Amino acid sequence: MYKYTHHNNELTIKNVNEIVSLKGWVNKKRNLGGLIFIDLRDRKGITQLVVRPESSQYEIANSVKNEYVIEVTGKVLERESKNKDLKTGEIEIEVEALNIINTAETTPITIAEFDNVSEEVRLKYRYLDLRKPSQQRYLMTRNEITQSIRKTLLNEEYTELETPYLVKSTPEGAKEFLVPSRLYHGEAYALAQSPQIFKQLYMIAGYEKYFQFARCFRDEDGRADRQLEFTQVDIEASFVDQDDVMELTEKVMANMFKDVLKKELPLPIPRMTYAEAFDKYGSDKPDTRFELLIENFTESFKDYSIPIFAEGDVIRGLRLKNDAMFTRKYFDKLTEIVKKNHGKALAYLKNEAGLLAGSIAKFVEGYLLNEGELLILVPGAYEDSTNALGAIRKVIAKDLNMIDESLDNVLWVYDFPLLEFNAEEQRFYAKHHPFTSPKDVEELRNNPKEALAKAYDIVWNGYEVGGGSIRIYLNEVQNLMFETLGFSEAEKLNKFGFFLDALKYGTPPHGGLALGLDRLVMLATKTDNIKDVIAFPKTQSAKDLMMQSPSPADSKQWDDLGLKVIK
């Protein structure tokens, strides 16, 4: 039993008259004038079976239903009505023997590409949803990308190593998942947000070139391109500089494009400073598939008295060709987006048949604007204005179909600020993480607000798919970084004492990068939902509908941990 000669996508006209054995699931059964046709599906594809009324297998074939698991043996015949959309569409199998391996109840979702079932139902019955060819393509592509990356790194003599999941809680930015200890009441592990410290410890230990496909855990709010647990391709090397890491990553990406997407990725990948990316695109992960750049209009409006433009405001905006889409209602929509992205207000001005119109037209009589041209303006502080314009830039491009979806634009963004200043708390936070090396140590010491980092992100079609940095390897610089971040001596020793000790024992210069595997697969497969490319994802509200988790723990489990639930 269970022997087969071919998968269900392999047989062609060249196999006519051969006796073959197949297995799989019944994708569809049709009874047409006595002839029974069965589409047999496995992970490779579909083959049509035919059972004639005079066949000894007719009765058993008539009893099968969708999603039954069967095996058959029969002769390959040329089909009279060929299906050009099917790889095996020129042939069919005349069944000589049919065995039902297992039956199936009527499934709660149809195993078909277009079933009009909600995402909640699909995720509840994810094991059935994963039978769909599209879902299988997502995960097969994930496997191909994984193997391509692994092959490249192994060829570059990187060693695949592992790091722990249960770690010490450290301030690395995102909220952590805490795991209470049964043995030490009142104490807890954290699930690793990343392998950051451990991969640096591998460098201190002398392994020089490391990688792993690391599971990472962050207790963050859900969104279309983020999950609570995710996989990153973690890479670290000793005796490297920024260019070395970027060149290795380019090799990984180019090989992935060639192996999986069957495309060439032009090298070297273009580079753009963070300052340029933010100034022109309002984002540190700019989508450069369309040219809609943010401009500075402060000078051109300085002589006009416009109520929403306050003294000291910078006035930044987008210049577009006027379109019928730009109605009052549409500008209301853009205004809401501006406010959600910390923008002060939105104004617009357009030239319609030689006449100025728009929300500020009556205040700017005589302003020169080309006929058919539209300005969308956001006044305020530079960062707030630019950030808001970056958000509406993407919305407008999508709504006007400005984006060529066939393009794959990959670029580097580098020279990030090392630190972010929180005015409310009057303290600095690390822009990347506290182990990122400054470009200039004296700048960090004397003018931390202006300090730049040896950090770099790789961006694909407006998504950050990887980020990394050259790390601090000198103990005195790491101490300076912690002090700048406001850590007391006690906090340094409590959180990172072991790491500061490790830096004392001959730490080599080192750096690396982590690629987001889930995002890579999402972009490679042209889906806009990261849940599609993860086998068993959580919902946007952080629930596993299939396993019904999180779920209540019983009182004994809480007692063993020395914890009490407060509702």
Image (cartoon, rainbow, N blue to C red):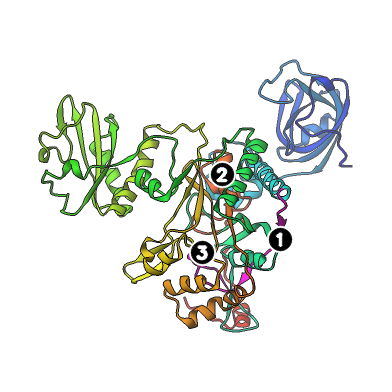
The secondary structure that dominates the magenta segment is loop
Q: Which residue is mark 3?
A: 219
**Side (left or right) of 483 relative to 386:** right
What residue is drawn where x is 27% and y is 46%? 335
Cβ atoms under marks 3 and 1 closer than 8 Å? no
Between discs 1 and 2, the one toward the N terminus: 1
- Label 1 residue SS: loop
Q: Residues within 10 Å of mark 2 (few under 14, many from 20)?
A: many
Give the SS element for disc 3: loop
- Residue 522's tag is 2
- Residue stretch in magenta: 156-179
Q: Position of residue 158 (x, y in %)?
A: 70, 54
Name the residue carrying label 1: 161
Residue occupying the point 51% across, 71% down: 478
**Label 1, label 2: how far apart the Cα atoms are:** 26 Å
Q: Residue furthest front?
A: 442
Q: Position of residue 416 (x, y in %)?
A: 44, 55
